[in-house]
């Protein structure tokens, strides 16, 4: 999926969080967003996902203004962990299948196996560790067969073995021309994956750079 950001400006109140941000991604590009806590990384994602209202002509997906898109299709989203309420009673299996009708096809099995969720399928999510929950959300996003995959700090709390699994999956998705936007403080993790970096600054400036450029 192509992504065009055109002079995006947004603030929750009078105070701006994002000011005059512009860049473009082609299908299959991998973007890493980097920036201090509070610099507006998650806010940018909220704009992109229409979770907040923005003016017309600022964000285009496959050349369509997101304000003209009624239903978002083929967009996978892994939210930042601490924005999720784990208290409600639902099992892993229920989370995964509620977003996905055909229960046991090949894609489902592959994703569940790769993220090592088989053993915990019938557990209630409030009994799980942060890393396990993170892997469930990654699986859920992948099950939507995304053309655009957005991950907000997906590796926080995930152990080394599972980090490797996530890395491998992202690498494969990239080869399948899926556009990926990843927020991460872990520059080592994205090295070898990312094509571009977006550095957000809390003084509202930003820089968009190709990987390898100084
Ligand atoms: N719903 C909201 N209403 C008002 N202000 C908000 C809201 N959500 C976030 N903010 C403010 O917007 C700014 C950017 O927050 P945001 O969550 O986008 O930062 P972030 O870069 O994702 O930080 P982190 O690294 O901690 O996840 C912060 O100053 C935050 O306090
Ligand atoms: Mg955030």
Image: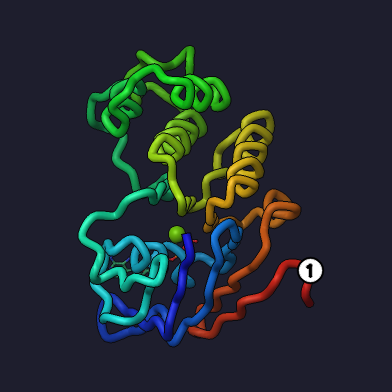
Q: How does the figure colour the protein chain or chains? A: rainbow
User: In the image, ligand 1 is in what quadrant?
Assistant: bottom left
Left or right side of 147 for 71? left
In this picture, is 23 found above or below 171? below
- Which is nearer the eye, 162 or 8? 8
Q: Is residue 210 left or right of residue 179?
A: right
| Residue located beneath label 1 in the image | 212
Residue occupying the point 36% across, 23% down: 92
Residue 187 vs residue 102: left or right?
right
Residue nearest the observer in this picture, 82 or 117? 117
- Give the percent coordinates (x, y) of residue 131: 51, 33
Q: Is mark 1 within 8 Å of ligand 1?
A: no
- The residue under the point 46% across, 68% down is 3
Above or below for 62 versus 186: below
Please name whichever residue, 157 or 149, is drawn nearer the observer in this view of the structure.
149
Residue 27 spot, x, y in % from top left: 54, 60
The vertical placement of 52 against 58, above or below, is above
> Residue 100: where, in percent of width, then height?
31, 30
Residue found at the very far left of the displayed protein: 70
Query: Horizontal and vertical percent for residue 184?
Result: 58, 56
């Amino acid at each position: 999926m192509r992504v065009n950001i055109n002079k995006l400006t947004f603030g929750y109140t009078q105070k701006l969080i994002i000011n005059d941000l512009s860049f473009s991604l082609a299908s299959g590009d991998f973007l890493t967003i980097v920036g201090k806590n509070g610099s507006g990384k998650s806010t940018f994602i909220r704009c992109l996902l229409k979770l907040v209202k923005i003016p017309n002509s600022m964000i285009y997906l496959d050349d369509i203004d997101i304000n003209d898109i009624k239903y978002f299709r083929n967009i996978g989203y892994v939210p930042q962990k601490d924005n999720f309420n784990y208290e409600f009673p639902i099992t892993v299996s229920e989370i995964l299948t509620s977003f996905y009708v055909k229960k046991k096809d090949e894609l489902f099995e592959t994703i569940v196996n790769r993220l090592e969720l088989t053993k915990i399928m019938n557990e209630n999510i409030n009994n799980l560790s942060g890393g396990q929950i993170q892997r469930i959300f990654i699986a859920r996003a992948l099950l939507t067969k995304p053309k655009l995959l957005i991950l907000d700090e997906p590796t926080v709390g995930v152990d080394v073995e599972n980090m490797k699994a996530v890395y491998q999956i992202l690498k494969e998705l990239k080869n399948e021309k899926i556009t990926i936007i990843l927020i991460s403080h872990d520059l080592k993790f994205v090295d070898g994956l990312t094509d571009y970096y977006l550095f957000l600054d809390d003084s509202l400036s930003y820089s968009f750079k190709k990987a390898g450029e100084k």
